[in-house]
Amino acid sequence: MIIETKNLTLVPLTADFLSTAAAYAIGSQHIDMMVYFPMDTIEELNAYLKDNTLQFEKAQPDFLDFAVLYQGKHIGQVTLYFEGLEGSGELGWIIRREYRGRGFAAEAAEGLMQYFHKNYSICRFIAECDSENYASQRVIEKLGMRYLETHGGRKNRSSEEERLEMLYEKCMGGKE
């Protein structure tokens, strides 16, 4: 499964991307407001990537992570978590620090939404982010998502503190 956007190529994120994924996935100095990241070790990241490869083989995966490639270089990942309700998915993204601020996260997420809407009839997309993650809030705005609520209970991986989480959604029409 390959998804092409104007500037990016999205391909399954496999263990082949271990060293380049480590650049953004390991160490809290890169990311500190995410639920599943940062990873603590290269072994943990490798296990995560192997699980992702298995997800692409399932008839009904729990999630799918795609490597975001810009000019052939792995710069981040974009994820679709399949929600319990059919036709619904949750978006996630992370872009290497040196590539942030160029619209790549929004372009990758929009490409994922368009692809899964057209090919798999997913019509409702949600995104959640830490209430202080202003960069992700800007991505969400670019995606045209609608704010739903702010609630407690968020646990970021790099912190023991309970945080506030903002929830957004975008509903797309029926299958095109």
Image (cartoon, helix red, strand yellow):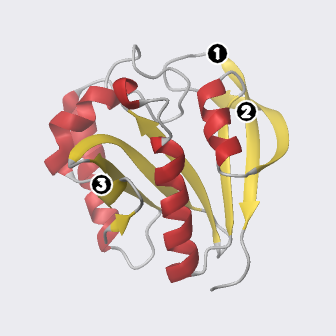
Amino acid on which disc 2 is placed? Glu
Q: Secondary structure at mark 2?
A: strand
Residue 35 image-quadrant placement: top right
First reached walking from the N terminus: tag 3 or tag 2 = 3
Residue, disc 2? 165
First reached walking from the N terminus: tag 1 or tag 3 = 3
Judged left or right of residue 117, residue 37 is left
Q: Nearer the viewer, mark 3 or mark 2?
A: 2
Amino acid on which disc 1 is placed? Glu
Which of 114/43 is in front? 114
Judge the density around disc 1: few (<14), some (14-19), many (≥20) Cα neighbours within 10 Å: few
Give the number of callouts.
Answer: 3
Q: CA distance from mark 2 to mark 1?
A: 12 Å
Image x and y of residue 167, in percent? 75, 43
Image x and y of residue 104, in percent? 45, 43
From the viewer's perspective, is residue 59 above or below residue 39? below
Residue, disc 3? 51
State the residue at coordinates (64%, 15%). 161
Amino acid on which disc 3 is placed? Asp
Q: Which mark is residue 161?
A: 1
From the viewer's perspective, is residue 46 above or below residue 86? above
From the viewer's perspective, is residue 89 above or below residue 58? above
State the residue at coordinates (24%, 47%). 71
Judge the density around disc 2: few (<14), some (14-19), many (≥20) Cα neighbours within 10 Å: some
Judged left or right of residue 23, residue 138 is right
